[in-house]
Amino acid sequence: MAAQRVLIGGEWQDSQGTKTFTAFDPKTRTALDENYPVSPWSEIETALQHATAASRMMRNWPAERFAAFLENYAARIEAHSADLVAMANRETALPAAPRLKDVELPRTFNQLKLAAQWAREGSWKTATIDTAAGIRSQLEPIGPVAVFGPNNFPFAFNSAAGGDFAAAVAAGNPVIAKGHSSHPGTTRLFAELAHAAAQETGMPPGFIQLIYRTSHADGTKLAAHPQLGAIGYTGSRSAGTQLKTAADAVGKPIYLELSSINPVIFLPGAVAQRSAELAEQFASSSTMGAGQMCTNPGLILTIAGEATEKLVEDIAARLTAAPVGTLLGEGVLDNLSKGVQTLIQHGAQVMAGGQPGGGTGVCYQNTLLWVAGRDFLAAPEALQTEAFGAASLVVVAQDAGELVQVLEHLEGNLTGCVYSATDGSDDVLYDRVVTVLRPKVGRLLNDKMPTGVAVSSAMNHGGPFPATGHPGFTAVGLPAAIKRFARLACYDGVRPARLPATLQDKNTTGTLRLVDGKWATADVAAK
């Protein structure tokens, strides 16, 4: 069976690679009929050369060019929704509706449109003018960006269509998309639409390129390549840290989303007031998408007591009764099984589930484990092992002091949730808890589960390591996400006619600029 073609230098062409892989249907646990190539280094390097040429060609292009591409591409995705949903459903077993058709795909083309809007608006550049010193600066495109997409969001985080892709293009960069083996066909369809949009809007040949898989050695080689501007990566902690080591060694910007167990803290007053509500919310959140969400609540922290015992029993019962979802693939199942076993080996007791099976295709029972606070403190690193799926660990502290001790041992996470009493009885403890929790999470929530990630300018989908590689950036939320793929460029005494349009005295772009310490859109006054 011939392998699918790669998109290199503006052309769909046969891969130079001799190794291939096959897509997989998680529902039937059988291989699909498409064959995909593993790109050798020579092919990756060729893509880099084309991307570098595109980057140089586009260096002074107006934002309108990139915005037009993003909008054209978004329209094409919307028009081909049925084909994309069918392919993604077949490759990932994620429900066609509402998950793919009604939620994730609209989010995908809408965030492309939003990226176009912010590309035009331009304030993300932070254009700064000091007329007295004759110095001007702004954020500018960083150069070719490689995007490594994850397995669990075939649309919204896809390497050829998702948030990293949209932000990189809005900043004015070419993108090399590295597809994920869980949904190569979906990524191919996206790349076909992106290629057509690029041709129609007059983008250079190396603007959007696609490879499906690389060897680990070639992936780290790419991360350190001098022609690459930056990397956006969402995936496993082990592979991500390897890329980070290679990128850090040469000072290459790399933006990672790795692992997060997203602690949920149930304070005593909340447990006493609305135990059944907490149990329902947690069970629904932890089983959403078969637990394959980057913000899946994998850790409950609470304080011992009769009400807590009843809450844990209620959660376990609800998880046992809930349908078991299909996982994305055998690799996810293997890692989930290993994660649960690691927790058990370090003292966690199974309250529900704990075994493969229970559903259709590749699956694992909805699982709840329990451990005492003192036992968690004896092995905090092992008991924070991510079990990526519908599996969570309850840590029951003896008192408030032990709860705070547990919090002090937490690694960085994307989110942290605190449920407290509505009558103020938990307020003193809440302050103690949040003082420790707040620096450890990117997004703090009150009285709600973390699984929804709104596409909002105020959103932070980031956090301290190992949630991400850098706590100062977000993968969701424009225009902030655009800044990851930009560099600060300073112009000192550069002749006026040679300045970028956004830094010239006459503000033809209408961009908000910091002029002599004051934000304004007006022209620079003559002196």
Image (spheres, rainbow, N blue to C red):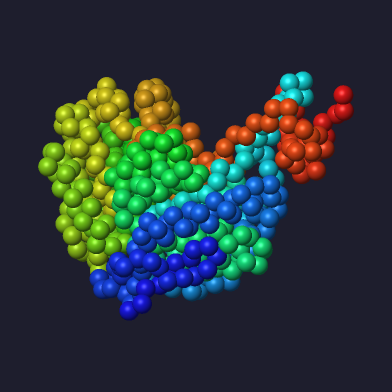
Q: Is residue 516 visible?
A: no
Occupied quadrant, residue 444: top left
Occupied quadrant, residue 128: top right
* Residue in the image at 40% along x and 43% along y: 224
Left/right of residue 30 with respect to residue 473 in the rendered view: left
Instruction: Count up the numbered dots.
Output: 0
Residue nearest the observer in this picture, 470 or 463: 470
* Residue in the image at 36% along x and 69% along y: 36
Quarter of the figure with the C terminus: top right
Residue nearest the observer in this picture, 286 or 228: 228
Image x and y of residue 392, in percent: 26, 46
Q: Residue furthest right?
A: 526
Q: Residue furthest bottom?
A: 1
Q: Is residue 90 visible?
A: yes
Left/right of residue 521 with respect to residue 412 in the rendered view: right
Image x and y of residue 303, in percent: 26, 31
Quarter of the figure with the N terminus: bottom left
Above or below — where is 84 with respect to 403? below
* Residue in the image at 19% along x and 53% along y: 337
* Residue in the image at 52% along x and 41% along y: 484
Image x and y of residue 15, in percent: 40, 68
Residue nearest the observer in this picture, 324 or 188: 188
Image x and y of residue 28, in percent: 27, 73
Above or below — where is 29 with respect to 265? below
Residue nearest the observer in this picture, 304 or 207: 207
Above or below — where is 27 with respect to 210? below
